[in-house]
Every structure is written in structure tokens, then in C-alpha cells.
Image (tube, rainbow, N blue to C red):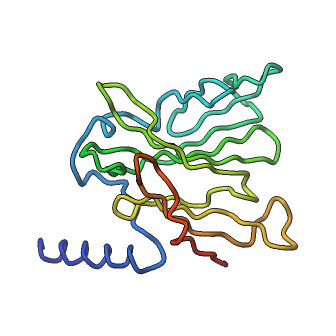
Amino acid sequence: MRRIAVTTCVVLTACAHGGDAPIANHGKAGPTSGVRAIDWQNRTYVLDELGPVTVKDGQAELAISDDNKAVSAGAGNGAYHVEPPLFADLDGDGVEDVVISSVLSTGGTGQFSDIRIYTMRAANIVELAAIPGGDRGDGGIRHVALDGNAVIVDRNVLAEGDGVCCASGSQRERWIWRSGELVEDVAARRARRP
């Protein structure tokens, strides 16, 4: 049984490096760390100028006040969604980090994606880096996964003739830690079509 598990792992890793989709790391394998002890699907996030939003099971309904702040709403016209966390030591310091992908809907047709990377330092959650997102139609993030210590992002890209809502294309990006920051490996970027 152990031999089958090891073989499967090797095959999946090979597919992740040369195939179409890298492997997402949702599981409990790998070293435990402070970031795994946080319930990322049930906590408060600070959304820049909108302020704090608390998610339950990865979801929060909200409204935007007249002073451009997020306020809790039982049946609000906006929402904030947090995907399950991905874990890897992205910066190579020996401490596991967490990748959090989210989407903010402010109540209209806009849906704004975002990726943030957090780590633990002195028992505190610290934002380590961010990968810019975009609106659902142009620059919005379709999918996030890990390939070793790289973050793989599939991003919506509008093609000529596309409506603002509906990108027909995407690009795959590879984000890596280099010289003390998370940067896109532009040479690895690939255009993709459905």
C-alpha cells in the first residue's frame, strides 16, 4: 500500500510540473506550523479601505456604507468569499506560509479577486505578500494552486469582442519568491484558451 501511495505522489508531482494543472495543497501533509492552526475560513479579514469583514465557512454578506466601509448585512447586496487555504514555505525560511484567495462582490456586477500570503512571526499573523487580482472579466483570478513553492495563478484575460463580464481567455502565471519578495516569473507566463 505504501508503494502505491509513493508512486501516486511521484506521478502527481510529475503531472504538476509538466501537465496542465498543478496540485493544490489543501491537505494535512507536510510540516505543521502556526498557519495551519488558524481557521482561515472563520476569521476577520481587513479589506483595505473597506475595513474588517468576518467570514463564516468562508462567506460573509455585506453592504457598503455611504463612507465606503463594509458593514455586516443579513441579506446585503455584497459578499466576500474566501477559498480554502493552500500551504507551502514560499519564501524558503523553513516556516510554512498560507495562500488565501478571495473574491469581493460589492453588490453590482463587479467581482474583485485577490490573493494574499500570510505567515506567522512571534505568534502573530503577518501579511507576507500579495498577488494582484482584478475584476471577474479582466484580470480576475480563475484558479490558484501550488507547484512546490510557487503559486500558480490562472487569470481571466479579455479578448477582442469579449464583453466586460465574460473573458474568453486566460493566462497562467507562476509566482515565486526572489530577492526577498514574491514576483511573477514572467518567462513562465502562458496564454490559455478554453
Q: Residue furthest left?
A: 2
Q: Position of residue 121 (x, y in %)?
A: 32, 30
Q: Nearer the viewer, residue 168 or 152?
A: 152
The foreground one among 125 and 8 is 125
Residue that lies at the very extreme toward the top in this rendered image: 67
Q: Is residue 188 above or below residue 73?
A: below
Give the x, y percent position of residue 83: 51, 48
Q: Quadrant of residue 193?
A: bottom right
For residue 94, side relative to residue 91 (left or right): left
Count of labels in the image: 0
Give the quadrant of the N terminus.
bottom left
Where's residue 68, x and y in %? Answer: 77, 24
Is residue 34 found left or right of 43 in the rendered image?
Answer: left
- The quadrant in which residue 150 appears is bottom left
Q: Is residue 34 above or below residue 99?
A: above
Image quarter where the C terminus lies is bottom right
Give the camera-side residue of 161 and 60: 161
Up/down of 149 relative to 102, above or below:
below
Query: Percent position (x, y) of residue 54?
Result: 55, 27
Q: Residue at x 43, y 80 (%)?
A: 19
Most extreme residue toward the front is 179
Q: Residue at x 38, y 75 (%)?
A: 17
Residue displayed at 67% across by 56% down:
140
Q: Residue at x 73, y 30 (%)?
A: 75
- Establish if 9 lies above or below 102: below
Res. 190 image quadrant = bottom right
